[in-house]
Image (cartoon, coloured by chain):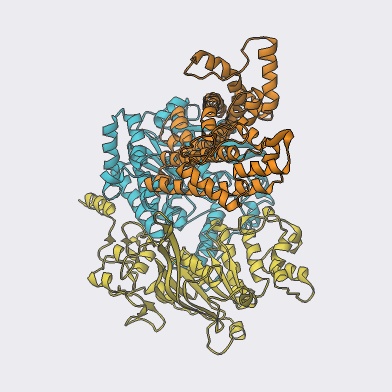
Chain colours: A yellow, B cyan, C orange
Amino acid sequence: MTEDIVLPASREKNAGVDGEPLLQVSKLTKHFPVKGGFPIRRTIGAVQAVDGIDITVHAGESFGLVGESGCGKSTTGRLITRLLQPTTGTISYRGQDISHANRKQLAPIRSEIQMIFQDPYSSLNPRQTVGKIISGPMEINDINPEGGREKRVRELLEIVGLNPEHYNRFPHEFSGGQRQRIGVARALALEPKLIVADEPVSALDVSIQAQVVNLLQKVQKELGIAFLFIAHDLAVVRHFSQRVAVMYLGKIIEVGDRDSIYTRPRHPYTHALLSAVPEVNLTDEDSAGARERIRLAGDVPSPISPPSGCRFRTRCWKAQDKCAAQEPPLIQISGNRADHLTACHFPEEPTIEGRDEDIVLDPALAALEEGQAE
Amino acid sequence: MTTLTKEAGAPTPAGAGPLLSVRDLHVSFKTEDGIVRAVDGLSFDLERGRTLGIVGESGSGKSVTNLTILGLHNPMFTTVEGEILLDGRELTTARESELEKLRGNKVAMIFQDPLTALSPYYTVGRQIAEPYMKHNGASKKEAWQRAVEMLGKVGIPNPVERAKDYPHQFSGGMRQRAMIAMALVCDPDLLIADEPTTALDVTVQAQILDLLKDLQQEFGSGIIFITHDLGVIADMADDIMVMYAGGAVERGTTGEVLRAPRHPYTWGLLNSMPRLDSDLGAPLSPIPGSPPSLLTPPSGCRFHPRCTFQDRVEGTGRCVRERPLLAPDRASACHLTADQKRTIFIEEIKPRLG
Amino acid sequence: MLRFLVRRFIGAVVILFLLSMVTFVLFFGVPRDPALLMCGKTCNPDSIANIHHVLGLDKPITEQYGIFLHNLVMGSDQFAQGPCPAPCFGYSYHTNEAVWGTLMDRLPTTVSLTLGAAVCFLLVGLGTGLLAAWRRGTLIDKTATAGAMVISALQIYFLGPLALAILVYQTHWFDKPAYNPVSQSPVSWFTGLIIPWVVLSTIFAAQYTRMARSSMIEQLQEEHVRTARAKGMSRAYVFFRYAWRGSLIPIVTIFGIDLGSLFGGAIITEYTFSLPGLGQLAVQSVFFSDLPLLLGVMLFSASMILLFNIIVDALYAFIDPRVRLS
C-alpha cells in the first residue's frame, strides 16, 4: 500500500507562483460566544470550535479532514469558504489574506472557492430548475461563457453524469445521489480552483456513495481542482485524500501523508479512531487479531471547556501529568516522514497491528469482559 | 412467492423450534400516491442466542419488518399478511393486549437516534423502570433499583445519581447505553436493534457494539441487528440476510455471505464500499442507478434494472419476467446458476476487492 | 428559575414604560381635543383654555408625561377631586372618578366572564380534541373536526345576538345576561353569566379542539412515543403520559395569550351582553378621548398579557425539563 498517486498534469497549470500553496491557513480560531449571566445577559464563555489550526492545501491536491462530531471540521470548512468570520488567524488564498476580507474583496475569490454540502435535500432551492440552480453562480458573478450559460450548464450536467435534457427539471424529480450530482455541477460552474466538500456522501445510501465519490475523484483529477474533503468516515477520506489531518476538539492532532496516517499513526487518538472502524474481513476466517483493538471510555468532552494541555488526555491511556500541564506541539516525531506531524508527548508505535493486550478503557466493557474471561 | 413450504401450523413448544420465524411476510401501506409494498414475501428464522444481521439500504423494508414483528405499524394504513411466530406463537393475528405483554418483555427494541427515541419529559431512571414495573409487577422502588443496576451494567458512571437525570443531560453515547439498559431490563429473548449506532461517532460506536456483544453473552438474547453498514454487520452478526426492495436476496452465515457472496447486489455492496485496506489505485465500483420506488417495483427480479449480470442468465429476459426465489438456509435469489455465481465472484468481483 | 422570573419582570416593566410613552405620543398626535367634548354648548376659546389648564393639557407633553409617571409611582394629592394614592392614573375626564378605582370596579366582571369561559372551553375543547385524536380517522374524529371547523368560522357578534334572541327573548329559558357580584348571590352570578360563558367559550372550544387534536397527533408520531409503545406500555398510558405532555407546550402557549387578552377585556362579548367589564371601559375611554382612563386601561391590559406570558414561560419549565435545566 505504498503506491503514490500520480498527480495530474493539470496541477502545474493551476499552481500560481512556484511552490506557493493554493490555500494556507495559519493559527485559525473560531470561538462561538456562549450567552448567559444575570441580570443582563452577556457573553460568559466561548465554544472553542476551532482553536489554532494550520492547514496547507496545494493546487490540485486533495486534503482530507477527519474527526468526530464537535471536532470543528465543518466549522473549518465554513471558515475557509468564508461563510463564517474567523475569530483570529489568517486564511490566505494564493498569497492573498482573505480572513477578514469584506464582500467586495471576496467577490473575485468566491468563484474560485466553492462548497459542496452534506444534505442534497436542503441545499438545493426546490423552486428553481436544475438549469437555474447551476447557472446561478455564473449569473451572480456575471460570467458569460462562450456559447452561452445554457450550453455550459448542459456540459456540466454531462460531466457529473446527468442527462443534459434534465435542464428544466426541478430538484424533487431527482434521487438523493442525483441531487448531490447537481450540487457538484453547481460547484463546478465557475471553474473553481478549490472545492470544500463537507460530508458530501454521508447522507447517501451505500451504493450511491460510491457513485458520488467516484465523480468527485474524476472531477478532482481531470479538472485539477484542489479539494478540502471533510468527512467522519475514515475509509472514504482515505480513498479520496492524498494528505489527511485528524482533528479532535478544535485542534489538529495529527497530519500527514495518507499512507503514513493510516498505516503508521503515532497519536493515540488516531490509533483509537482507526481501530474503532468496523471492517469487513474478506480474507480468511481467523484474522480477528490482525488489527489492534482500542476501546475508549465515554464521549468527546464539551468544546466549551476543553481539557487543559493535550485535549485528548481525558480519554487517553497514556496520559500523565505533563499532558495536563503542557499542550503538545504539532511536530515531526523521530521516525516519521518529514510531512507527518503529531501533537503528542508520548506517541504510539507506528503500526496498527494487534497488540498483546487490547486497550479497553470503557469500564462496563472491561467489567463484562473480565467476568466472561473467568 | 417463496419456495418455502409453510410448516405445519401446530405451534412448536418453547425451546424446540427457532425463537423467531417469519413466513412469507407481506406488508403494504396505503399512501396518497398508491400502495407501497414495503415488504414483499419475506421469510427468515432466528435461533435463540444468535445474531441475525439484516443489511439493506433505505427502502429495503428492513425497518418495516421489525416494526411489524412488534405490531407497531399503524393498523389503519397497513396491511400485513403472512406469519410471524415467536416461540411458536402467531403474532400477526395476536390481540393488542397480548402484544403489549410481549413488548419490552420478551421482545425489546433499540432505535437509531437515542435523542428522539427517549422521552425528554421523564428521567432516564423512570423510563427504564417503567417496563420492569409493568411486566414484572415490581414496585416503584424495586423497579428504580433495577434501573440503577442496569445503568451501571451498561457503563453509566455513578448510576445512582445519573438515573435521576433527563436524557438531554446525557451525551449521545450515554443515551444509547440508557436505551440498551431499557431494552434489556426485562431480560428479553429477542432484541431488535435498528441501526443502533448510525447516529454515533465511530469511537463510541465501537464501544456500543462491543457492549452489545458482551451483554448478549450475559443475557443470551437473540438479536436482530439492522444496519446499512457491512463493516458493522461483519463485526456483530452470526448470520446475514441481505434485503433489497422489500425482499431478501441473499442469506447465509456471516462468513459465507461476506467471503463468498452469491448475489449481484451483495457483490455491488462489497465493491462500492471503501475499506481501510482497499486498493487505492482503482476507483470504487458503484452499483449503477438508484433503489427502485416501492410504489411501482420492477417486474421479475427487483434488482434487474441495476444488474450488470442479467445477460448471462440463460433464457433471454428471464430476469425481467420471473422473480427469482430464495431457498431456505444458505441461498441467494438470483437466476444465475450456482457455478456462474461462484466463478463470477472469484474471477470478477474478488480481484476488485483488493 | 428565580433569576429567570426577575429578568422577565424587569423586561415587562420596560415594555410597559415604552407602551405608556407611545400611548402618550399617539394621544397628542390625534387631532381631537378632549376639552371640546367636555365644555359642551358654552364653548369658547377661554373656557377651552381653562379646561386645558385644569387638566394640565397646556403643559409641554414631556412635563405631562413626567407628572403621569410621578403620580403612577408616588401617588398625588394635587387633584381637585381628592387624593390619589399610587398607582395613580388620575381622574377620568369624562366621569370624574378615580381611574384606578374604576378599573378595580370593572375587574370582577371581566375576571368572572373570562374564568368561567376558560373553564368551559378548556374542558370541552381539550376533551373533544383528545377524543378525536384517540379515535383518529373514525366518524367521531371526522364529526369533531368538521364541527370545530364550522364553529371556529363563526363570530361572537353573530353567535351572541343569536343566543340572546333564541334563549332569552323567544324561549325565556334564561335571564337576560347581567353581572351580579358573586359575594351577593352566587346563584344569580351564575345564571347571569351562563349565556356569555357559553357563547364566548363555544368559539374558543372549537379552536382548542383543533389545536389539541393536531398537536396530539403530531406527538403520537414522535419517536419517543413509539419507544414507549415498544416497551409494552398501553395505548392509554402512552397517550396520556407521553403524547399529552408534549402537546401541553403549544396548548399552554395559546392559552396564556388568550387568557391575557381576555383579562384585558372581551370587548365584543361585553358589548353584546351589556356587561360592565374592562372591554367596555376601553371603548369608552377612546370614545371620549379620556387620556387618564385610556392610559389606565391600556397599561392594565398590557400588564395582564405580559403577566400571563411570564406565567406561560414559567410553566414551560414545569412541563419540559429541557427548559428548566438550560
Instruction: Answer with the quarter of the image where residue C228 lies.
Output: top left
Question: Picture coordinates of residue A325 (x, y %)?
Answer: 26, 72
Q: Nearer the viewer, residue A200 or C56?
A: C56
Asked whether residue C283 is in view, the answer is yes
Image quadrant assignment for residue B108: top left
Find residue B116 and report its horizontal and vertical position in percent: 46, 45
| Residue at the extreme right | A147
Toward the left, the furthest residue is A374
Q: Nearer the viewer, residue A349 or A308?
A: A308
**Looking at the picture, does residue A101 appear above or below residue B298?**
below
Q: Residue at x 34, y 55 (%)?
A: B207
Q: Is residue C135 above or below residue A73?
A: above
Horizontal side, residue A362 vs residue B334: left or right: left
Residue C216 screen position, x and y as percent: 53, 34
Q: Is residue A155 visible?
A: no
Rendered position, C73 above or below B289: above
- The image shows residue A205, relative to residue C91, as above or below, that is below
Q: Position of residue A367 (x, y in %)?
A: 24, 51
